[in-house]
Amino acid sequence: MASVRATPAAVGALERLRERHGEIVLHQSGGCCAGSAAMCLRADELPPGPHDVELGKVGGVPFLIDADLHRRLGSPDFVLDLAAGREDTFSLEGADGVHFTSRVRPAKVPGSR
Amino acid sequence: MATIEKAQVFEAPGREGSPVEVKDRYENFIGGGWVPPAKGEYRENLSPVTGEPFSTVADSTPEDIELALDAAHAAKATWSKSSLEEREKVLLAMADAVEENLQMLAVAESYDNGKPVRETLAADIPLVADHLRYFAGAARAEEGRISEIDEKTVAYHFQEPLGVVGQIIPFNFPLLMAAWKIAPALAAGNCTVVKPASPTPWSILKLMEVLADVVPPGVINVVNGPGAEIGRALATNKRIAKIAFTGETVTGRLIMRYAADSIIPSTVELGGKSPNVFFADVMDADDDFLDKAVEGFVLYAFNKGEVCTCPSRALVDESIYDEFMERVLARIAAIRQGDPLDPSTMMGPQVSKSQIEKVEGYVEIGKEEGAKVLIGGHRTQGLADELSGGYYFEPTVLEGTNDMRVFQEEIFGPVVSVTKFADEAEALKIANDTLYGLGAGVWTRDGARAFRMGRGIEAGRVWTNCYHQYPAHAAFGGYKISGVGRENHRMMLDHYSQTKCLLVSYDEKAMGLF
């Protein structure tokens, strides 16, 4: 089973966002300009849909991903981190001039067929 | 390209001799004029060319979206009732103004985004003008349909403007994507509030300087600021009648959810992982066509790979693989990278620090997964000193298999993942083995095969023996999770219109039910 972890910087940012916005949630995105990053939204903004899976919680915040996307990526482990600079998304941390990144470690090594 | 043969390097905006003036600060463009953000906040705008700030733009809050919507609704009363002739005149005047300022806008766009000025001079800005003219003509030539229900009953169908729409623009083609959205909205009689992308907030303001005198006040309004605040404030606003968005999938879902909450239409374009398929017969002769196919592979580096339709998965017939790739790699090695304001530069910097970090990260992921780096793979070294703070990455080729993450996720950088196939059936299977379906390329001298593949690939646009052409009058949009809706074609007018049906009875007699 894949897991998700967060760096102390990411956990700190999540705590600040929760103080400001209440319950929050992370959605792993894909595609286009600012894709392939975790987006932090208020929990009522985009509740888990029928195709989302929760990979775990980081700093008490659920980390969700579309099941198809998760499978396509090889069901990897995610590490949520924080980087400088505002990304061009609806993710809440942008207002602080930072953005979440989600690094992965492949759960398996494909390409061995 | 005739005008840039001399390879004159343009001075950076704001410097002496540059075609582009730069003010210290840029307000929002609302109601035909410049309006300071309600809270008076501005943020530095960096150029990816140097990594240095060169101006400041409004850092708006939801109050500014309300101001823009006030202006748009005030303009709506007149614009939505304007004759098609009047709308056509405005759109044509916009196109003329763009063309008269071609060089200035091309340099501004290049500096804000990092794309080479040879592209903005030859493609981005001329296409902006062309799209405006196309929709001016398309709207003028529209006609409603009349259905005769029976001898005494007729249905008249009128296309009516939606009213005021919200449009969220991506950073990769800040002016062209704005034109793709603004032109049909205006042509169909709507007023718009536009939210540019945060990394590229400025070139569209230079465009509005040019258009301020030709567009009626309030018909186009531009508000800059963070997506989470003002993008959301726009997309959730009850005073918009439609929302259009280009970006990634989670925001795409959000936009569609907001649209559901307000019960309004939305169109979303959400990226891709486009296959570019090269059959063995491309090497049947050493001729112009082969040369074109080799260039077609290298087009993954167009706009430094920051294109939703980037041909980021190359599929090459195994029987020609070594020979074809030798030519491709030689062509990639000849790419001139550097100052995008030098017209001989083919590839500029990534748009932002976070983008180049993402690209770098993906190359590492690819290597961890076992992909082989055939060329590139690092930040570009040996550039001029003044570019040392910019975000330059080498054009890169990763060799691997389609199940790798670098074949499945959009990297949005100058990185192509290449793999082999044995026959047409396998090529089609790999091409469709993706969540996305925006673009694709097919290269073959066999016309029947070209059609079979083109119809078989699940994507909205299949370039056949070409790639990365975006003419007006050719529909563009996604299959699968690449989005909903089409752009670039007169069918867009339907996305920006309501259908009014007048059902008219000529019969004097009652129906006889009561």
Image (tube, coloured by chain):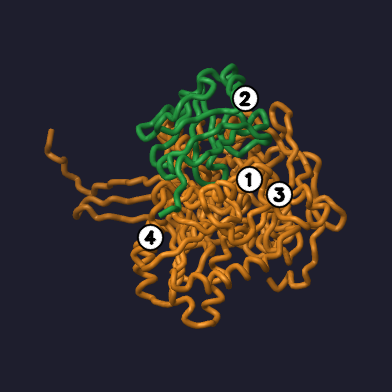
The residue carrying mark 4 is B457
Residue type (three-letter) at the residue carrying disc 1: Gln
Q: Are marks 2 and 1 on the same chain?
A: no
Q: Is residue B255 left or right of residue B18?
A: left
Badge 2 sits on which subunit? A
Query: Which label lies toward us, 4 or 3?
Result: 3
Q: Report how far apart the C-alphas of labels 1 and 3 lie in the structure.
A: 8 Å
Gap in Å between the C-alphas at discs 4 and 2? 44 Å
Which residue in the structure is indicated by mark 1?
A: B355
Q: Are marks 4 and 3 in contact (CB under 8 Å)?
A: no
Q: Quadrant of residue B52?
A: top right
The residue that appears at 67% across and 45% down in the rendered structure is B352
Among the two numbered marks 1 and 3 on one chain, the one whose residue lies closer to the N terminus: 1
Q: Local crowd at mark 4 within 10 Å, few (<14), some, or many (≥20)?
A: many
Locate residue B74, reporting x and y percent: 58, 36
Label 1 close to label 3 by CB (< 8 Å): yes
Residue at mark 3 to residue at mark 2: CA–CA distance: 27 Å
Q: Chain of mark 3?
A: B
Looking at the image, which is closer to me, A49 or B376?
B376
Q: In the figure, residue A71 lies in which quadrant?
A: top left
Labels 3 and 2 touching (C-beta < 8 A): no
Chain letter, colour green: A
Q: Which residue is mark 3?
A: B391
- Residue on which disc 2 sits: A8
Is the residue marked by circle 2 packed among few (<14), some (14-19), or many (20+) residues within 10 Å?
Answer: few
Direction from residue A79 to residue B433 in the image, left or right: left
B170 relative to B17 in the view: left or right:
left
Disc 3 vs disc 2: which is toward the camera? Answer: 2
Up-down relation of residue A91 to residue B340 (above or below): above
Q: Secondary structure at mark 4?
A: loop
* Relative to B2, residue B15 above or below: above
Instruction: From the rendered image, report the letter of the chain displayed in orange.
Output: B
